[in-house]
Image (spheres, grey):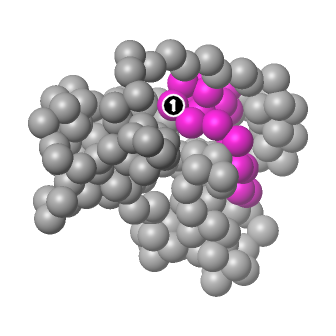
């Protein structure tokens, strides 16, 4: 039984790598005012940051929908695959909750959910670790157990140029 790995676009793994890595990347939706983009599909990381510099307001995002997860889950479970989903931290997005809703709807124990507790590079690291374990022949349950241990050791440090975007996005008061 093959193991399918699903992750959201906050992992910053380029969409063009999906086939080579044998993973699925589901995009979050990015909103700049009335404009809507699918992360990594309709807007690149470079274009996102260029647009952010000129936008009056900071962009907002929408989580991956339960229906998007359910459609992909159904496809893979119908084919007899185990599924491992690794999402952006549930404290940062409702994407994990969407995946949980889809799993609950399908009532299928071959779907395994992992709240990464992180995003970007930390999330990508977990995905690459899961891929490596899958290639070594580990089963879904063993991969999930290992990823749950690894995620507790991830620490991400970030530096910001200035506080402008935090203020624009309402994350920082004046």
The answer to whether residue 38 of the structure is visible from this angle is no
Outermost residue, front side:
174
Indicate left or right for 123 with 50 as reference. right
Q: Residue at x 17, y 47 (%)?
A: 56
Q: Secondary structure at mark 1?
A: helix
Residue occupying image coordinates x 72% and y 74%:
108
Horizontal side of 68 relative to 2 (left or right) equals left
Q: Answer with the quarter of the image where residue 19 lies.
A: top left
Question: For this view, does 89 lie left or right of residue 76?
Answer: right
Q: Which residue is mark 1?
A: 120
Q: Tell me which segment is drawn in magenta.
A: 112-131
Q: Is residue 86 above or below residue 162?
A: below
Q: Main secondary structure of the magenta part?
A: helix
Magenta segment includes 94: no
Residue 86 in percent (x, y) is at 63, 46
x and y, in percent, of residue 126 in the image:
65, 30
Position of residue 165 relative to residue 92, above or below, is above
Q: Is residue 55 above or below residue 74?
A: above
Q: Quadrant of residue 32?
A: bottom left
Q: Residue 116 in magenta? A: yes
How many numbered dots are placed on residues in this image?
1
The quadrant of the rendering that contains the C terminus is top left
Instruction: Establish if 65 lies above or below 81.
Output: below
Q: Position of residue 27 (x, y in %)?
A: 37, 51
Q: Nearer the viewer, residue 81 or 66?
A: 66
Residue at image point 29% right, 50% down: 59
Which residue lies at the image location 79% right of the left edge and 43% below the top edge?
144
Q: Front-most of 152 and 81? A: 152
């Amino acid at each position: 039984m093959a193991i399918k790995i699903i992750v959201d676009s906050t992992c910053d793994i380029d969409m063009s790598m999906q086939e080579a890595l044998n993973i699925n990347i589901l995009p979050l939706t990015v909103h700049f005012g009335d404009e809507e983009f699918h992360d990594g599909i309709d807007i690149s990381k470079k274009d996102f940051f260029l647009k952010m510099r000129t936008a009056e307001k900071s962009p907002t995002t929408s989580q991956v929908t339960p229906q998007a997860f359910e459609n992909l889950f159904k496809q893979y479970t119908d084919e007899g695959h185990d599924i491992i989903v690794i999402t952006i931290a549930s404290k940062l997005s409702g994407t994990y909750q969407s995946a949980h809703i889809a799993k609950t709807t399908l009532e299928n124990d071959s779907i395994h959910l992992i709240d990464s507790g992180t995003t970007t590079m930390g999330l990508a690291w977990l995905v690459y670790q899961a891929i490596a374990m899958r290639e070594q022949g580990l089963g879904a349950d063993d991969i999930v157990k290992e990823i749950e241990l690894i995620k507790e050791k991830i620490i991400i440090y970030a530096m910001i140029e200035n506080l402008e975007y935090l203020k624009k996005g309402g994350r920082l008061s004046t």
